[in-house]
Image (tube, rainbow, N blue to C red):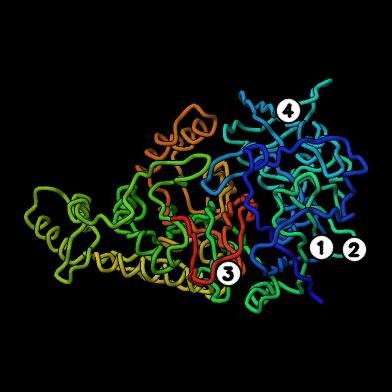
Amino acid sequence: MKKSFMLKGVSLLLSISMALGLSSCAARTEEQPLPGEEEQIDRQPIELSQQEFILPWYRSEGYNPYMTNNSLTLQLSDLLFEKLVVIDPNGELEWRALTGYSIQGLSVTLKVNTSLCYTDGTHIGVQDVAAVLQAARVSSMYGARFSNVENVTVPEGSTDTVEITLYQPDVRFCWLLDIPVMPAEQVTAQKPMTSARYTYAKDADALVPDPLRAELAPFDRIELWEMTGKDALSGSMNIGAISLYATEDESCANGMGSSRQAGFYTNTLVFLGFNAHTTAMETKYLEDGTPTQVAVSTGVSPLVASATGRQIINSLLDRTQLLEKVYYNQGHVATGFFNTVGAAAGDGMFSASAQPEEVQQKLEQLGYTLGMDDMWYLPPEEKKTDAGSAEDTQQKQDSTENSLTKVNLRLVVYSGSSYKRYLAQMVADTLTSAGLQVELIECVSMENYLQKLNSKEFDMYIGEIKLYNNMDLGAFFKPDGAAAFCLQLPETLTQAYARWRAGSSTTSVMESLLTKEMPWAPLLWRSGMLYYSKKLTGFTPSESSVFYGMENISLAAEEVSETDADIPS
């Protein structure tokens, strides 16, 4: 049987230190009960109503995000464990269990906020911070983001410093540190000591306010609803079995009618990829049966093979329309290669709307011909003949007239995603209306999609990738990067990227170089979505924590629209 729980009705006038969870940490006394001893906290009800707050949870995954890759465990950890840093709803960095850092070359020095404490009153220490960093490096949840970390140490005798050695310079490294802190000896425990708003209830699968941070906990108790499968999440939200559900899945872009919603910035980039490989290696067999590698043409359009051609395609794209029609404005347009919020906030280098004004002039300068059918044709192929002969001159003219080939751009999309398919169709229609013929190649399975991309027999593709919070573009620049398979980046660009990452070049300079080369065309940044009970209001989630600013939650007035949403744009 579900229980009902009071929502605090008094407004919380918190100092900045309280808002960050920096409450004083005295040693635990008889007046400070252990977790689960259910201290009675004076709370005034809002009006006369009682409000349940129930969160989804997988019992088998426990509470420790270092021991699982489960998103619900990660969500609960925001309530249980303070983080080293937090990224706020505006994409700004906030210091929590750390107070600051310095970086010089490959060395990063972290300063630990030793005034913070766990629920039993003991203080967070340098060994705890070092231990969670080591645990993160080998975890399935965080391991990939810390692949650039070579070593983590605590200087001998230090009480507030942790040192990190990187493999490569990264001045934005601290944007990766939104990870939970817990006692060093408990980083592999299923229920580590807590240090945030809530702690474990003693009598059931539930959470109760941490006595040291009760002012930040708006609910007297949070019940945990055990999930049985991924598909159960949205269903449980729709029937009211759970009070909150956060997702970055595009399939939830059109919302859930049974809940309110609040968007939050993410670094999930949707982009138009270009194939720079005009040839690919293919296995051929000699007469004696010996296999050999032979370069064969991939049929890549000359338009896509040139930086100017890629710039022309980019200028024809209306990102505002793509965001509005495909993703219901849940995100923001990409007007540059870096997100406009976060670690490397860029100012943008190209327009959100289409800019077709100079396209005809640029295509003509490249030698393309606009046919009577208003479609563009490739530059004619000139035959090699001896100069000076009238017959040769006539042959050259005939060859020019007869060798015109219509531009044809092969666009690959994974059609298992209705959003990606619609996006690809809109891109195809846009380019076709500008005179550039597009052949849409739909791959019904992800396996077929990846096979097609690996064959390199295409011109463009619709891609999506989640970048890390430090705006690491290694997915494009590293040889084994997830989006590097069809790129051939000039050495000058890779060197410029290394300088930018090391802090010796600005974001605007890097974006300018990328815009000139246009190796891929960023389209939009998708938002994550938080769906929650219509009875509540005041959620301000961020990518670091869906419970950011949770102390400001209140009961919703009846007149508030059911479709009310706060979506970053």
Return the disc, 3 or 2, that comes first in the chain's sequence: 2
Q: Is residue 520 above or below residue 236?
A: above
Is residue 451 something that shows in the picture?
no
- Are there few (<14), some (14-19), or many (20+) residues within 10 Å of tag 2? few
* Residue position for label 3: 446
The answer to whether residue 409 is left or right of residue 63 is left
Crowding at label 3, few (<14), some or many (≥20) Cα neighbours within 10 Å?
some
In x, y percent, where is residue 163? 73, 27
The residue wearing badge 2 is 203
Chain-order first, disc 4 or disc 3: 4
Q: Of 141 and 253, which appears nearest the observer?
A: 253
**Disc 2 to disc 1: CB gap under 8 Å:** yes
Q: Residues within 10 Å of mark 1 (few under 14, many from 20)?
A: some
Among numbered discs 1 and 4, the one appearing first in the sequence? 4
Mark 3, mark 2: which one is toward the viewer? 2
Q: Which residue occupies the extreme left position in the image?
A: 390
**Residue 220 place in picture, x, y as percent:** 76, 59
Res 412 label: none
Residue 81 coordinates in the image, percent (x, y): 76, 47
Q: How far apart are labels 1 and 4 at the CA level?
A: 37 Å
Query: Mark 1: which secondary structure?
Result: strand
On the rendered image, what quadrant is the N terminus found in? Answer: bottom right
What amino acid does circle 1 point to? Ala
Residue 293 image offset from top left, x and y in percent: 55, 55
Q: Say what secondary structure mark 2 lies in.
A: loop
Tag of residue 206: 1
Residue 437 visible at all: yes
Foreground mark, 2 or 4, reads: 2
Q: How far apart in space, not on screen, are marks 2 and 4 (Cα)? A: 41 Å
